[in-house]
Protein backbone atom coordinates (compact mmCIF):
# COMPACT_ATOMS: atom_id res chain seq x y z
CA UNK A 1 0.00 0.00 0.00
CA UNK A 2 2.84 2.42 0.83
CA UNK A 3 4.33 2.00 -2.66
CA UNK A 4 0.99 2.77 -4.31
CA UNK A 5 0.52 5.86 -2.16
CA UNK A 6 4.04 7.09 -2.94
CA UNK A 7 3.59 6.55 -6.68
CA UNK A 8 0.25 8.38 -6.65
CA UNK A 9 1.80 11.23 -4.69
CA UNK A 10 4.86 11.28 -6.92
CA UNK A 11 2.85 11.41 -10.14
CA UNK A 12 0.60 14.16 -8.76
CA UNK A 13 3.59 16.23 -7.67
CA UNK A 14 5.23 15.80 -11.08
CA UNK A 15 2.06 16.95 -12.86
CA UNK A 16 1.70 19.98 -10.59
CA UNK A 17 5.34 21.06 -10.77
CA UNK A 18 5.68 24.39 -12.54
CA UNK A 19 8.82 26.41 -12.95
CA UNK A 20 9.04 30.21 -12.69
CA UNK A 21 9.26 30.29 -16.46
CA UNK A 22 5.55 29.59 -16.64
CA UNK A 23 4.95 32.92 -14.91
CA UNK A 24 7.19 34.62 -17.46
CA UNK A 25 5.19 33.01 -20.29
CA UNK A 26 1.91 34.14 -18.73
CA UNK A 27 3.23 37.68 -18.63
CA UNK A 28 4.35 37.52 -22.26
CA UNK A 29 0.97 36.21 -23.35
CA UNK A 30 -0.93 38.81 -21.34
CA UNK A 31 1.23 41.67 -22.60
CA UNK A 32 1.45 40.25 -26.16
CA UNK A 33 5.25 40.37 -26.11
CA UNK A 34 7.38 37.80 -27.93
CA UNK A 35 10.12 35.83 -26.24
CA UNK A 36 12.63 37.49 -28.55
CA UNK A 37 11.45 40.94 -27.52
CA UNK A 38 11.80 40.05 -23.84
CA UNK A 39 15.23 38.50 -24.37
CA UNK A 40 16.45 41.71 -26.03
CA UNK A 41 14.88 43.82 -23.31
CA UNK A 42 16.59 41.91 -20.48
CA UNK A 43 19.88 41.53 -22.34
CA UNK A 44 20.08 37.78 -22.89
CA UNK A 45 19.93 35.54 -25.93
CA UNK A 46 16.80 33.75 -27.05
CA UNK A 47 18.43 30.46 -26.05
CA UNK A 48 19.15 31.75 -22.54
CA UNK A 49 15.55 32.92 -22.19
CA UNK A 50 14.28 29.55 -23.39
CA UNK A 51 16.40 27.82 -20.73
CA UNK A 52 15.04 30.21 -18.10
CA UNK A 53 11.46 29.57 -19.20
CA UNK A 54 11.96 25.79 -19.25
CA UNK A 55 13.51 25.86 -15.79
CA UNK A 56 16.80 24.35 -16.92
CA UNK A 57 18.66 27.33 -15.44
CA UNK A 58 17.65 28.94 -12.16
CA UNK A 59 16.62 32.53 -11.64
CA UNK A 60 19.60 34.08 -9.89
CA UNK A 61 19.41 37.34 -7.90
CA UNK A 62 20.72 39.51 -10.75
CA UNK A 63 18.15 38.04 -13.17
CA UNK A 64 15.41 38.45 -10.56
CA UNK A 65 16.30 42.15 -10.31
CA UNK A 66 16.23 42.45 -14.11
CA UNK A 67 12.84 40.74 -14.25
CA UNK A 68 11.57 43.12 -11.58
CA UNK A 69 12.56 46.12 -13.69
CA UNK A 70 11.13 44.61 -16.86
CA UNK A 71 8.03 42.69 -15.75
CA UNK A 72 7.13 44.60 -12.62
CA UNK A 73 7.08 41.82 -10.01
CA UNK A 74 9.59 42.22 -7.18
CA UNK A 75 12.99 40.60 -7.01
CA UNK A 76 11.77 38.74 -3.93
CA UNK A 77 8.80 37.40 -5.87
CA UNK A 78 11.05 35.87 -8.55
CA UNK A 79 13.51 34.47 -6.03
CA UNK A 80 10.68 32.93 -4.00
CA UNK A 81 9.23 31.32 -7.12
CA UNK A 82 12.64 29.81 -7.86
CA UNK A 83 13.12 28.68 -4.26
CA UNK A 84 9.72 26.95 -4.22
CA UNK A 85 10.40 25.32 -7.59
CA UNK A 86 13.76 23.95 -6.44
CA UNK A 87 12.24 22.68 -3.17
CA UNK A 88 9.46 20.87 -5.04
CA UNK A 89 11.98 19.35 -7.47
CA UNK A 90 14.02 18.10 -4.52
CA UNK A 91 10.92 16.62 -2.91
CA UNK A 92 10.04 14.79 -6.14
CA UNK A 93 13.60 13.50 -6.41
CA UNK A 94 13.40 12.23 -2.83
CA UNK A 95 10.09 10.47 -3.53
CA UNK A 96 11.58 8.87 -6.64
CA UNK A 97 14.52 7.56 -4.62
CA UNK A 98 12.21 6.22 -1.92
CA UNK A 99 10.01 4.48 -4.47
CA UNK A 100 13.08 2.76 -5.96
CA UNK A 101 13.90 1.32 -2.53
CA UNK A 102 10.46 -0.18 -2.00
Image (cartoon, rainbow, N blue to C red):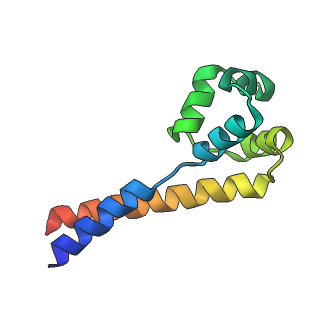
Q: Give the farthest residue toward the bottom.
A: 1
Q: How many marks?
A: 0
Q: In the picture, residue 101 is in which quadrant?
A: bottom left
* Quadrant of the rendering where the N terminus is positioned: bottom left
Looking at the image, is 77 positioned above or below residue 47? below
Q: Is residue 27 above or below residue 101?
A: above
| Residue 102 point in image, percent of width and height | 13, 69
User: 4 left or right of 65?
Assistant: left
Q: Nearer the viewer, residue 35 or 46?
A: 35
Classify residue 36 by image quadrant.
top right
Nearer the observer, 36 or 77: 36
- Identity of the residue drawn at 80% across and 41% down: 71
Pick the residue in front: 1 or 47. 1
Does 73 sit left or right of 22 as displayed? right
Name the quadrant containing residue 44.
top right
Return the x and y of residue 47 as percentages of the image width and height.
58, 22
Q: Residue at x 57, y 29 (%)?
A: 50
Name the residue at 76% across, 21% down.
Answer: 40
At 51% from the left and 51% from the top, the residue drawn is: 18
Image location (x, y in percent) of residue 38: 74, 28
Q: In this rendering, is residue 16 above or below 39?
A: below
Q: Position of residue 4 (x, y in %)?
A: 18, 71
Position above or below: 1 against 102: below
Amino acid sequence: MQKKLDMTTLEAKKRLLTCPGNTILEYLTHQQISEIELAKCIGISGIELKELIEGTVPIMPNMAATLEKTLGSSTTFWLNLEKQYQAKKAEIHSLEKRSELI
